[in-house]
Image (cartoon, rainbow, N blue to C red):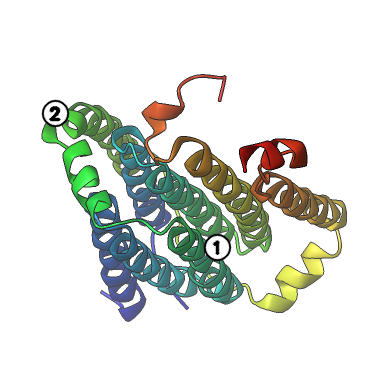
Amino acid sequence: MNTDLLIFFISGGVAIVATILVITQYNMIHALLYLIVSFLALAVVFYVLGAPFAAALEVIVYAGAIVVLIIFVIMMLNLKKDAEEQERSWLTPGVWVGPGILCAILMIEILFVMLTGGFEGNATQAVGAPEVGRSLYGPYLIAVELSGLLLMAGTVGAYHLGRQRRKVIHRFLEMTDE
Amino acid sequence: MNAIPIEYGLILAGILFMLGMVSVLIRRNIIFMLISVEIMLNAAGLAFIVAGSKWTQADGQIMFIFILTMAAAEVSVGLALILQIYHQLKTLDTDAANRMRG
């Protein structure tokens, strides 16, 4: 067994275990920390698969930007101590057994197809950032511009939705109150 | 350089996608559902990376970059919606938001 395959198995196992811990946590901040571990392990998987640029983007954007954004919102919501108890009461075995069994059946089907199907060949060589950049600004230029448009729409949408409406009390009503 | 069979990578992507899907199904907290959607998008990106690395093409990584962009836009809009729901309903329970009228 060569070292790349060993690293793939170790980091893939870490990613799976960290993701299981994410979906079984009651405390939201703990779940997010495990989510960062899962993303970092997946970045190692990307690197071993020969995609160093995608590995760097995984660390910077997913583990950096997106998780920090979610942490900001959790801090803004200012959840109290009883949120954890409420989460514990929501996640009873009666809730997760049914979906878990159904999804496990689908997973077994995927495993069967993957392990018995005619997939041949290995991951061969690394594709570095220069090739990705040349292809990104060559044939995929319109898609890049469209994703820029998508990001701008996301920014405008987040600003519009996140704005808090101030409760307007009429000044005459205020005066009559006093 | 490396000799990782592609079915292992695709199986890893499938397992991560299944974990995210189970979490979407069983959770009632809306922030956990958003995190699970992120896990599923990440697993889809892993599948693209595996396929791109099999044929030594840059297209897989480019699709991953587009998935990343979409996830960033989606999480910003989703978090703004979560803030609005929390201000209106004073809870993060998705079952409390089952009516169209706020």
Q: Position of residue A130 (x, y in %)?
A: 73, 78
Q: Residue at x 80, y 56 (%)?
A: A148
The image shows residue B92 at horizontal and vertical percentages of: 40, 41
The answer to whether residue A123 is above or below residue A168 is below
C-alpha separation, residue under disc 2 versus residue under disc 1: 41 Å
Which residue is under mark 1?
Answer: B53
User: Is residue A168 in sight in this rendering?
Assistant: no
In this picture, residue A90 sits left or right of residue B71: left
Quarter of the figure that contains the C terminus of chain A: top right
In the picture provided, is B31 more to the left or to the right than A94? Answer: right
Q: Quadrant of the N terminus of chain A?
A: bottom left
View extreme (left): residue: A93
Task: Report which residue position mark 2 lands on.
Answer: A94
Instruction: Identify the subunit bearing mark 1.
Output: B
Instruction: Tell me if label 2 and label 1 are in contact, CB under 8 Å.
Output: no
Q: Residues within 10 Å of mark 2 (few under 14, many from 20)?
A: few
Q: Position of residue A55 (x, y in %)?
A: 53, 73
Mark linked to residue B33 = none
Q: Nearest to the eye among marks 2 and 1: give it.
A: 2
Tell which of B84 and B25 is nearer to you. B84
- Using the image, determine if residue A94 lies above or below residue B72: above
Marked residue chain, label 2: A
Identify the residue at horizontal 48%, vertical 56% (top origin): B46
Count neighbours of disc 1 (C-alpha within 10 A) and say few if under 14, some if 14 to 19, many if 20 or more. many
